[in-house]
Image (cartoon, rainbow, N blue to C red):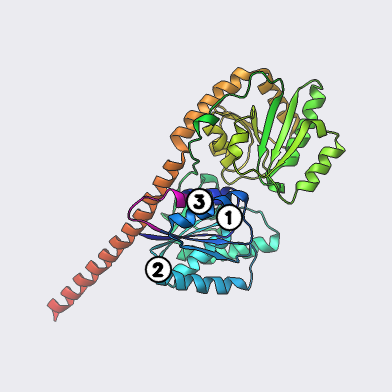
Amino acid sequence: MKIMQIVGDPVGGIRKHVHSILLNAPAHGVEQLYVFSNTNCDKQFVKEITQISTKLNGKVFSLRIEKKPHSSDLFNICRLIHIARKEKVDIIHGHGAKGGLYARVVSLFCKAKSLYTPHGGSAHNMFSPIKEKLYTLVEKSLYSVTDLYVFESIYTSKALFEKIGKDKGDKFIINYNGVPTPAPALLVEPKASKSTTNIGVFAMLRQQKGQVNAILALEHLLKLNPLANVKLFIFGQGEDSEMLEQVVHDLNLQPYVEFCGEVAFPEQFMAEMDIVLIPSLFESFGYVAIEAFSLSKSVIASRVGGLVEVVDEEVGFLVNIQDYSEVARTILYCIEHPEVLGSKGQAAKRKYEQLFTEQKMVDNLYDIYRSALEKDVQEKVEVQDSVYVGLKSRRNSE
């Protein structure tokens, strides 16, 4: 079984998802090829790509893949058709809008199965009206040549099919994301001797991740309780960096907020947090939540998108993230009731072990790949049988 993975923007959650698939492939019976964009990579990508290249015997292909429609798309597709034919690829799995486009177009020219995981962008209204119309038109036109949609949440599956006005039929499956089991050294409680409550936000610094909501909620918290000994740690980098720092300056919150930048191993810092806050305006799934669960951490998360499938009252708190009073009161409640955080954290760890381990995600996906190929073989047999019966019948009549 030869599988080509294509990702147009290998950063954050999408990079994490694809690299889990590549690094945990079954030892026998599977060959992988990896196609990625060299225009935008994060620190963890740089750290992992050498390991991936070694595991895949060097079958990694770096392309200039622009997020927007670009003249380079035609060249890239032609090159991938050549590679897929040469390598006799069985399955092409595209991730994200551009990766999904490439996978499905290339599959038409090399007799491979096409699988597509949207990862949010093309399934949700995240672009300007003109771009939305264009991307929706593209998705509608590619529906018939998509063998299977592999979604990371029920939320995204509903959003995409409603958007393109197509019937789900048997063309989709849900496979939740998963994260590795953390190192034992990380499975420790934050130091009891410290008096400050650490609140961590882990995400790229961009509008949809909502870090500004966390800052404004912190301001409201300090109005409710000026003596609260809290500190907000913001991990990540991105285009909103300067804006967020300016907001902190304007509100005189410098003593209470620390910008930590991008870190290669966020789990090490997450383990030191008392509260993990997810202030997103949109999430197709919610990787940060299950990373926190794996560390026995409860979360306070936005009541949006795929987060609603991941977080419930047993394992955390769902809030209207733009109701700063509600967020502030929830944080204060957690500070005043550490035993509740502890019990929810234990429930979160159990939920992680049941649903969100990396091994479970990968095992499920490779079962999906095998099923897709077996279905293809079965369909060919059925066609051959029907042709044979038809020929036999015609000969008898003659």
Residue 159 seen in the figure = no
Residue on which the image places disc 3: 19
- Amino acid residing under circle 2: Glu
The quarter of the rendered structure image containing the N terminus is bottom left
Q: Quadrant of residue 83?
A: bottom left
- Amino acid residing under circle 1: Pro
Name which residue lies at 70% across and 25% down. Answer: 197
* Residue nearest the viewer, comparing 65 with 369: 65
Residue on which the image places disc 1: 10
| Element type at mark 1 | loop
Q: Classify 10 Å Cα crowding around label 3: few (below 14), some (14-19), many (20 and above).
A: some
In the displayed structure, would residue 242 be above or below residue 61?
Answer: above
- Amino acid residing under circle 3: His
Q: Classify 10 Å Cα crowding around label 1: few (below 14), some (14-19), many (20 and above).
A: many
Looking at the image, the residue that sits furthest to the bottom is 398
Residue on which the image places disc 2: 87
Please say whether residue 222 is one of the residues in the magenta stretch: no
In the image, the segment drawn in magenta is 21-31
- Our reading of the magenta stretch's main secondary structure is loop
- The residues tagged by marks 1 and 2 sit, at their Cα atoms, a distance apart of 23 Å
Name which residue lies at 81% across and 31% down. Answer: 255
Name which residue lies at 67% across and 63% down. Answer: 131
* Residue nearest the viewer, comparing 216 with 80: 80
- The residues tagged by marks 1 and 3 sit, at their Cα atoms, a distance apart of 9 Å
- The residues tagged by marks 3 and 2 sit, at their Cα atoms, a distance apart of 21 Å
Mark 1 / mark 3, whichever is N-terminal: 1
In the displayed structure, would residue 86 be above or below residue 318?
Answer: below
Q: Which mark is residue 326?
A: none
Please say whether residue 27 is one of the residues in the magenta stretch: yes
